[in-house]
Image: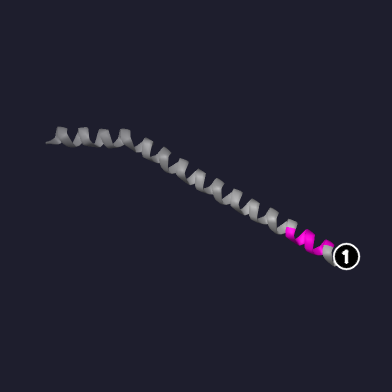
Amino acid sequence: MTEHFTGHNKARLEASPNRFFLACAVLALSIAFLLSAALAGTTAFRKEWQFASEANV
């Protein structure tokens, strides 16, 4: 019985870094996506603002 739990814990410990890496990768990808979306949004907003200020002149 003890041997079963030791083997189970060992398997869990070996699988853990893999899940951790996957979680980190997903987190990094979502942050990158949010940053690119924010950057695209601010760029479009700046162009619109520049266009509006030029139209006023």
Quarter of the image for residue 21 reads top left
- The residue drawn where x is 81% and y is 63% is 53
Residue 19 image point, x, y percent? 37, 39
Amino acid at circle 1: Val
The stretch in magenta equals 48-54
Position of the N terminus by quadrant: top left
Q: Is residue 51 magenta?
A: yes
Q: How is the image coloured?
A: one colour
Instruction: Identify residue for label 1.
Output: 57
Residue 47 image point, x, y percent? 74, 56
What predominant SS class does the magenta segment belong to? helix
Residue toward you, 49 or 8: 49
- Left or right? Give the position of 23 relative to 11: right
- Left or right? Give the position of 21 relative to 8: right
- The residue drawn where x is 22% and y is 36% is 8
- The residue drawn where x is 34% and y is 38% is 16
Residue toward you, 47 or 36: 47
Q: Residue furthest right?
A: 57
